[in-house]
Amino acid sequence: MTSTPRSATGHSVPTWVYLTALAAVTLVSRLPQLLSPNLLLEGDECILGLMAMHLAGGHEFPVFFYGQKYGLSIVEAPAAALNFVIFGVGALPLKLAMLGIWIVGILFYFLAFSSVLGATRSFWITLVLILMPAWAASSMKALSGYITAFSATAVAFYLITRNDNLRSTPWLFAGGVSAIIYFSQPLWLPGLLPIVLFFLFSSRRLSFWFFYLSGIVGVILAITLIKASWLAGAVESWTAPGAGNPHLLGSFPRLLNQTYVNLTGSYSVGFAVHPGPVTAIVAYLWLAMLAVVVLLQIYRLVTRKYLLWSHLLFASVLLTLLANWVLLDRRDARYMLALNVPLVFMTGVELFDLADRYRLSTRRCVSAIVLVLALEAVSMNEFAQLTYMWWTNPSSGPSEARTMEKVIDNMRARGVTRAFAMNPLLQWQITFYSRESVIVRWKDNIDRYPAYISEVDRALEHGETVAVVGYVRYTGGLERMVPDPRSIIDVDGKYFVYIGAEKELLRKAGFRFSK
């Protein structure tokens, strides 16, 4: 097998110039979203924000996402906490903390593939990854360890591919990083597996196997001990999806749709959001490219025109798809995030191999890449309009964050500091955006952070004035339960607030209490 020749390596350009440019493009390309009036943190992001607040305040150190025993948060929560200490608590510091972790991953991917493609070629393909719609929004979202898995996988790639001196120590660290990926989001491991196995087998050194497995076992033992002792009494309100798919053939169309939605990057938790027109075009182009590389693999095997890194990265893509299809029945788009990196770099490997075989000029290759980058840049701008809300405020109206602040102000102005949310995840948004000055719980009496439920229930039992909040179009029939529906406050036609709820009313509305 042969790899893509390292032509046009660009040694005349210092590495730090490439790294700085990649980081700058990443940040600038996200500005339309960060400055958009539609910017409003999702519920899961607010959970991470609250975790970071508690860490910054010295209250606790969250190892996993609240309410879970997976979704390692020892990277994302401290990064957000540091930003909160420096810049204050808010949506922008949280988003930038996540983006900072993602940028670290981007830089390590560039460095890792510089040894495969050469620095200049790796730079151009990494730019394509940066502007890929699939990562436009997800690169800044705290989604229970996904960004940690992205960057940890990049570090593992770097440690394995840049071990030019054939030392054992990088394998020890690569093993430890692999264990971190397992506890963060294990769906990234199938894509890493072909790279690990190839380099281990080709090294023909048992010491590398020993050090790699030692790193894995060491980190797994450490985190398992933490789970068994530190987290022994923690409430687990959210469990990982069950393994297994009883409807393999029947779920294949949904797998294709899951792949497409992932490539659009336009989704929120478990449901798709309508993408912009150019974003949809770019997603279909990547879906078509996925089909093309499948055909290329068949062609290479039949004609015996092997290309090492094309085969390795295709194995990463294939195993990621199979893991999602066979191991999971749920088809959430975010589960497919691990597909994107090997798909992009495999495309780059094939493009530059084509250029080398037919002696195409660098200008032609770069022109093709620039065309893709231009489309992706337009897509990036479309993400300024992306919202997971059912409907958005008009351009002449307040921003989404300002409307949320009005909800909080309405309650605080009436002396309310504890409330009940009719809609799931809304409790985390109000609690975070109010900096915990208004603590909100949902209907269930078991949730990710039990202290909030206890605090809200205590206020109700002690006769404090509490409120019910929710979305205007999703009231759950509350207007038929209250004595006077006109007492329900409408906030910008989006949220409602009802002040003075009593326990019997809350029971009728579906709230459950432990007492």
Image: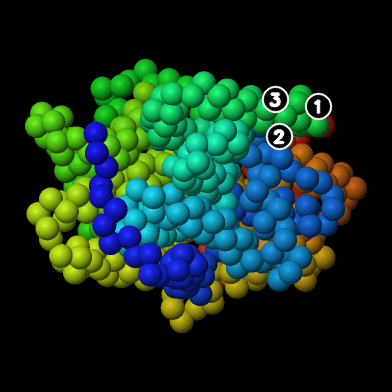
Dot 1 amino acid type? Ser
Image-based side of 283 in relation to 152, left or right: left
Name the residue carrying label 3: 221
Dot 3 amino acid type? Leu
Residue 514, given in percent of the width and then of the height, sits at: 78, 32
Label 2 vs label 3: CA separation? 29 Å
Q: Does residue 260 show up?
A: no
Name the residue carrying label 2: 446
Image quarter in which the C terminus is found: top right
Query: Circle 3: is it few (<14), some (14-19), or many (20+) Cα within 10 Å?
Result: few
Residue 301, given in percent of the width and then of the height, sits at: 15, 29
Above or below 481: residue 311: above
Residue 381, given in percent of the width and then of the height, sits at: 37, 71
Dot 1 falls on a residue whose secondary structure is helix
Q: Nearer the viewer, residue 379 or 400?
A: 379
Image quarter in which the N terminus is found: top left
Q: Quadrant of residue 176?
A: top right
Dot 2 amino acid type? Ile
> Nearer the observer, disc 2 or disc 1?
1
